[in-house]
Image (spheres, helix red, strand yellow):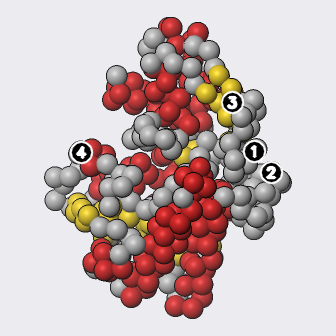
Amino acid sequence: MEEIKSTILITGGAGFIGSNLCEYFLSKGHEVVCLDNFATGYRHNLKDIVNNPNFRVIEGDIRNATDCQNAVKGVDYVLHQAALGSVPRSIIDPVTTNDVNVSGFLNMLVASRDAKVKRFIYAASSSTYGDSVGLPKVEAVIGKPLSPYAITKYVNELYAENFSRTYGLETIGLRYFNVFGRKQDPNGAYAAVIPKFVMQLMQLESPKINGDGNYSRDFTYIDNVIQMNELAMRTKNPEAVNTVYNTAYGDRNTLNNLVDYLKEFLSEYDQRIANVAVEYGPNRAGDIPHSLASIDKAKELLGYNPHYSMQAGLKEAVNWYWDNLK
């Protein structure tokens, strides 16, 4: 049976995750609308698709209700990726983080409700687990959030659930766990750890780990995240909507493991990288020590089957960075 083509709005579509989603759904023949204010997204992330006749870019801000209303016109599904990320940034500037992640999120919910979109799928966050110490993390058990950013992402879940109950808007939240991969920006004060370490190692600079390197994360390759978004969009199971899912691989690696793998893969290009020393600094405020997702719920209700382990994803990511950043 041929898949019915849809019109999909991807907010934050010029960002790391958003631009990968734009490319993927265009490759499947869907019409894609990208809404982005280009504060943390980049036009160069869209260079391979900007001339696609099924692709449209709206330069706008989710904090502007009119921009949200214009973006959802004629849209079947919303994949809401737009947010101001970074725990450290939210600690320095909680007001702006709240404006974008809470007020902007609410604007998009209202616009989607009014436009009668079929489903609103949004980027939630593993930071919602906060000070919960149990591993693996299961969706029904969370702790108190440890940063303003984490608070905003939990508020998103509360609003989404409320809109489902109150207005009948179908919502699905995807709690992303340390996503990495092609197009993730290595530059800037709030760069994610993997692209930052890759860039430093490529330049034969010592990566600096916060803490002793034994903190662990469920590092999740971008293609697993794309799979989850597609499954969330396509599911016909009524039990699978109006809830949240861990979006991860379901395994954890320490930061020391991470650096070892990066050095191994990058040294295939430049043998000197194998001998680059690692520096260690103090732990970072707001960081949780260990993160590991249970993906049983996503497997059961959505049929999720992640194809990329951290190692397999790192291999792909390293190849992409070497080809694009050298």
Q: Nearer the viewer, mark 1 or mark 4?
A: 1
Q: Is residue 247 visible?
A: no
Give how far apart the Cα atoms at labels 3 and 4 are: 39 Å
Q: Is residue 140 left or right of residue 59?
A: right
Q: Residue type at mark 4: give it.
A: Asp
Identified by mark 1, the residue type is His
Using a 10 Å C-alpha cutoff, classify the residue at mark 1 as few (fewer than 14 neighbours), some (14 to 19) or many (20 or more). some
196 sits to left or right of 219: left
Instruction: State the image quarter where residue 80 is shown.
Output: bottom left
Residue under the point 44% across and 18% down: 203
Residue corresponding to mark 1: 290
Q: Nearer the viewer, mark 3 or mark 4?
A: 3
User: Is the Cβ of the residue at disc 1 closer than 8 Å to that at disc 2?
Assistant: yes
Image spot of residue 172 (x, y percent): 55, 71
Sequence-wise first label, 3 or 4: 4
Q: Residue at x 54, y 46 (%)?
A: 179
Q: Are marks 3 and 1 in contact (CB under 8 Å)?
A: no
Where does label 3 land, which residue?
A: 281
Foreground: disc 3 or disc 2: 3
Near mark 2 (Cα within 10 A), the count class, few <14, some 14-19 or many ≥20, is few
Residue denoted by label 2: 135
Query: Rounded to the nearest whole Å, what is the CA distance between mark 3 and mark 1?
Result: 18 Å
Name the secondary structure under disc 2: loop
Name the element at disc 1.
Answer: loop
